[in-house]
Amino acid sequence: MTSSESKAGNRVLAGSCRCGVVRYEVSDAFVYAANCHCSGCRAATGSAFKAFAGIEREKLTVTEGLEDIVVFGEEDLNDTRCRACGSFLFSVVRDGAWVHVAMGSLVMLPPSVRHTTYSSAPRRPGSRSPTTCRNSTSTRHSRPLRASDILSIMSSGMRAALVRFLDALEAIGAEHEEVYDTDVRERLAAVIEQRLITKPHDVDVPDELGMFSVEGNRLVREALVSYLAEAAPRADALNLGEAARRAAVWDGEAASSNGTPVDEFLGWVD
């Protein structure tokens, strides 16, 4: 994307490192945003979380200081910083097709972006990059919910279904601790996102869900199938717009009966 091309389309936002040597432009067309609390993002930023917004890679252009950029990682999976001052600018993710723009590097934060708190669980050993946050590929949107939406969600029983699912996963975790691993959480979240939101009832639940054993995968799959069977008709009955439906499915305040928060089990909600 060239500077002229970007200005001809969506509103363009400016970004810069701290010293001003590296500057970039990005379309104000972010698909999702998050505060990621995973150990990789905390280490990369030196803070409690990484605030970022995701967008297609071609919608970001470095306009100044290209030779002063330093890349940590691979061409299609990396963190990009200013060589001079070390500012964290963006991460290239999702096989090189997307970037996660560090919101602190934007000159002005777009009002359309709203953060969503993501998982605090540690990375699975052997993960490729400290800040790829594959769990953070959700396409949640920021349209405010109406009061009627909230009342419908509260009365739908969605949280009760989710709590039962979390209880089942917690029971499995007593014998299979890998249920808390990033890979498992991401796979569960991907199926739920597709089955309940983007492609209702049109997604098969895979046999392999990232557990270390056949038995572990079987138990997690049974719990997931049971949850979907209960949650899907409840989500359909809401008859709400996409933002409200997402709020009903991705209930960030939910926890197991023992108090373990939902983001210890599901990987974006990543």
Image: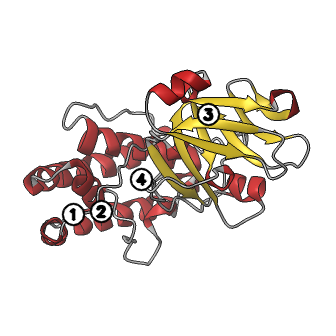
Instruction: Indicate which disc, 2 or 3, sits on the residue closer to the N terminus.
Output: 3
- Can you tell which of label 2 and label 3 is closer to the viewer? 3
Q: Is residue 99 above or below residue 142?
A: above
SS type, badge 1: helix
Q: Residue at x 24, y 63 (%)?
A: 145
Apparent side of residue 232 relative to residue 70 in the rendered image (left or right): left
Instruction: Indicate which disc, 2 or 4, sits on the residue closer to the N terminus.
Output: 4
Q: Where is mark 4, residue-wise?
A: 112
Amino acid type of the residue that numbered disc 2 sits on in the rendered structure: Leu
Q: Is residue 84 visible?
A: yes
Q: Is residue 131 visible?
A: no
The spot of residue 158 in percent (x, y) is: 21, 63
- Can you tell which of label 4 and label 1 is closer to the viewer? 4
The spot of residue 266 in percent (x, y) is: 45, 54
For disc 4, the neighbor class at 10 Å (few under 14, some 14 to 19, many from 20) is some
- Can you tell which of label 3 and label 1 is closer to the viewer? 3
SS type, badge 4: loop
Instruction: Indicate which disc, 4 or 1, sits on the residue closer to the N terminus.
Output: 4
Query: Do callouts 2 and 1 mark residues in contact (Cβ within 8 Å)?
Result: yes
Numbered tag placed on residue 162 in the rendering: 2
Q: Quadrant of the N terminus?
A: top right
Amino acid type of the residue that numbered disc 1 sits on in the rendered structure: Met
Query: Do callouts 2 and 3 mark residues in contact (Cβ within 8 Å)?
Result: no
Q: Is residue 69 above or below residue 169?
A: above
Q: Residue at x 83, y 34 (%)?
A: 69
Q: CA distance from mark 3 to mark 1?
A: 32 Å
SS type, badge 2: helix
Amino acid type of the residue that numbered disc 3 sits on in the rendered structure: Val
Q: Where is mark 3, residue-wise?
A: 93
Q: Where is mark 1, residue-wise?
A: 158
